[in-house]
Image: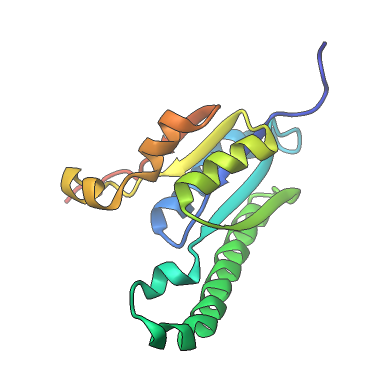
Amino acid sequence: MATSEKPVMVVGIDDSEHSVYALEWALDHFFAPYAPNFPFNLAVVHARPPPTSAIGFAGLEAAEVLWYVDADLKKIAARILEKAKEICCSKSVNNVILEVVEGDARNVLCEAVEKHHASMLVVGSHGYGSIKRAVLGSVSDYCAHQAHCSVMVVKRPKIKH
């Protein structure tokens, strides 16, 4: 049975230039050429780390600053979503779902795909080398293997000197 509901595209965003580039790229290639008949509904998702991950193993003294760390993480998340909203509005994409979900970005993005029944996930690539990727992990690699939809990893072009 056919449905008139548009498929959903989830775009993961953080405070990096790479994720902002991925959002702009997705808007330019999947939304702007089709205005106002966009082929997708758009959900922009930011994974906010839990405040305890920013503190680490500092001990009892950390409990005293936990509230401040949490407040800062909330401000950062609000700033990231505000920037995403501005980018979307500048490209005339106004009907956007903006979400902040606390947790590891890998899990948050895969869960967002499930929640929204997304047919595409777009993430940026930080371009880490193999050592950094092994230590820090790769959100895009994890999502490419675990998300139940197509995953587009958008890389920024290298600057030629």
Q: Determine whether 114 is above or below 149 in the image.
A: below
Describe residue 129's horizontal placement relative to residue 41 as left or right.
left
Q: Nearer the viewer, residue 41 or 21?
A: 41
Q: Nearer the viewer, residue 21 or 91?
A: 21
Asked which quadrant contains residue 114, the reply is top right
The quadrant of the rendering that contains the N terminus is top right
> Which residue shows up at 56% across the image and 67% down it?
77
Describe residue 87's horizontal placement relative to residue 107 as left or right.
right
Residue 29's x, y, as percent?
Answer: 55, 35
Residue 73's x, y, as percent?
Answer: 52, 73
- Coloring basis for residues: rainbow
Residue 6's x, y, as percent?
Answer: 75, 29
> Which residue shows up at 59% across the image and 51% down it?
45
Q: Residue furthest top?
A: 1
> Which residue shows up at 41% across the image and 83% down it?
62
Q: Nearer the viewer, residue 72 or 122?
A: 72
Residue 84's x, y, as percent?
Answer: 59, 58
Asked which quadrant contains residue 139, the reply is top left
Describe residue 151's horizontal placement relative to residue 132 as left or right.
right
Q: Report how many numbered discs are placed on residues in the image.
A: 0
Query: Does any portion of residue 64 appear in the rendered image?
Result: yes
Q: Determine whether 64 is above or below 153 in the image.
A: below
Query: Does any portion of residue 154 appear in the rendered image?
Result: no
Describe residue 92's horizontal placement relative to residue 28 as left or right.
right
Q: Nearer the viewer, residue 73 or 11?
A: 73
